[in-house]
Amino acid sequence: MTATVVASPPSTSLVVPSFRRPALLRGCLAAVAAQTVVPTEVLVVARRDDEETAAVASAAAGLDVRLLRVSLPGHIPPLVAGVEAARGEVVLFVDDDCEPWPEWVATIVRHYDDPRVGGVGGRVLQPGFEDEAPAARIGRIPLSGRFDRLSLHRPPVGAEVRDVDVLRGTNMSFRRALLAGYAWDARLNRGAASDYEVALCAWVRRRGYRLVYDARAVVRHHLGPRPEIGRALDARAIRDYSHNLVYVSATALPRWQRPIAVAGAFLVGNRSSYGLATALGDLAGGRRPSWRGQVLPALRGKVEGLRSALAYARSGPAPWRGGPASGARPGGREPVE
């Protein structure tokens, strides 16, 4: 009789970027400690002057926690520092204002039995989406290139497990060996670094790997305060979002789709980044957008996104000062332009 060989689950590194939200981080780490499969290691990445976060990380019970420090602001530097320090075969990501459900890690890692899978993520439960209707298309980028990230908050119609184009940044994972080859782009480190996960997921798929969405891998997102940039959709936030929208559309999507998506951003847009059709439609409907506070910042950000895309065409992703383009080490590096 031939013995059955049962593969052991891969080792895991959980990266948790955190900045001055100690109470939320405490809840996040408690939820991680309650997992049915606890991560092999947890990497909490904090700013050098953020002692509150350091204290919570040091006091975490039931976990192998390592504290990393970065000096650069923004969302991307702590992600990169975590990836560079990770030792696990699979790197998981969750924000500090999130609490994963107990089966989250176990649900994700079982998909890595398939060597074709490069990344796995799941559903994000978020305030305001409790009564949302189920979504038929989840995590897919349509012909127009307009990605509906909100679909990842809604329950799926049909299969709970499916291949997708994009995973949500606060509930995603990738093979560490794959991430080792990714050049994190400093141009995306603006504001909340919107759409950085679209660029990352597109890069993974271009290398022939599958991205898997499993609706049973659930993370509850509490939408905590952002100490430096806030959550208000003000002119600065609109400009940063619009830059990344156009930049990612012009550099990460399939080449045939890029002009369609960029043209759609300018001609159609959305209420977070007004385009011509959306602005005219709101005017006709009696909802007057602010020219100086909404329309103009969106246009400026999109033009800046085009300029960044031209720079990308000349030299590729923007590196970080003091080292290779792959990221910022725990000491921090300035982006180079």
Image: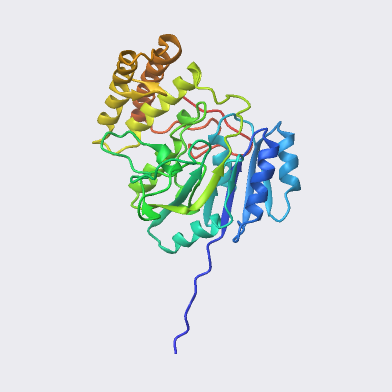
Residue occupying image coordinates x 61% and y 40% = 96
Give x and y (percent) for residue 7: 50, 70
Residue occupying image coordinates x 33% and y 45% = 137
Is residue 10 among what the camera can see? yes
Q: Is residue 56 left or right of residue 229?
A: right
Residue occupying image coordinates x 52% and y 42% = 170
- Frontmost residue, 281 versus 244: 281
When the figure is inspected, residue 279 is found, relative to residue 216, above or below; the finding is above
Give x and y (percent) for residue 17: 60, 39
Q: Give the quadrant of the N terminus.
A: bottom left
Is residue 88 among what the camera can see? no
Q: Is residue 88 left or right of residue 275?
A: right
When the figure is inspected, residue 150 is found, relative to residue 112, above or below; the finding is above
Give x and y (percent) for residue 203: 38, 43
User: Outermost residue, left direction?
Assistant: 256
- Frontmost residue, 62 versus 333: 62
